[in-house]
Amino acid sequence: MSPLSLTGVVLLASGLGIMGPDVPFTHLVRGPLSGLDEPAQVVVRSRADWQALWNRHAPNEETPRMDELDFGEQMIVGVFLGSRPTGGHTVSIEQVHREGTRLVVGYLERRPAAGSLVPQIVTSPFDVVVLPHHDETVDFVRLDEASQ
């Protein structure tokens, strides 16, 4: 392929919104129960904001890794699904990547299969991750299971 043809492919791909480079992340905490009853997608860039979020999420628990996190170098993003009528609902942040000047957080929400036996308890699933600090806008995108 000639250099001119390759340039055309790159320009075409960038115009289609194809994902940019992945951003590494680590799951900090996730589970089935949160104090946040309404759906929320959060971006935390300071120690004070992390403490405030944790106080809403789990007011009777110690904030995890508070002394280990360096908000000059790291930030936190999270997805809280809000109240769900039964067990069997989960959420998982699956990918973070750059797209132009913004970060895109892709998450997967799983629901129990129709007719499956699940605990009859209200749940509020959540997933929170740590990633390198970025000042860009952060967008959240719900992924389809088929895209995984």
Image: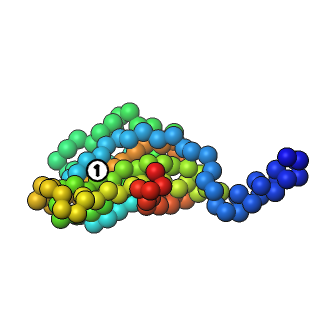
Residue at 61% x, 53% y is 19
- Provide residue 79's location: percent of width, then percent of height: 36, 56
Identity of the residue furthest to the top in this view: 68
Q: Is residue 133 left or right of residue 68?
A: right
Q: Which image quarter: residue 16?
A: bottom right
Residue at 44% x, 48% y is 94
Q: Is residue 55 left or right of residue 142?
A: left
Identity of the residue furthest to the front in this view: 115
Q: Which image quarter: residue 57?
A: bottom left
Tag 1 secondary structure = helix
- Crowd around label 1: few <14 · some 14–19 · many ≥20 (10 Å): some
Find disc 1 in the rendering and name its residue. Answer: 54
Q: Nearer the viewer, residue 120 or 147?
A: 147
Give the residue type at disc 1. Trp
- Provide residue 147's location: percent of width, then percent of height: 48, 55
- Provide residue 86's location: percent of width, then percent of height: 17, 60
Task: Determine if residue 35 is in view.
Answer: no
Q: Which of 112 and 77 is in front in this view?
A: 112
Q: In this view, does 100 lie to the left or right of 133?
A: right
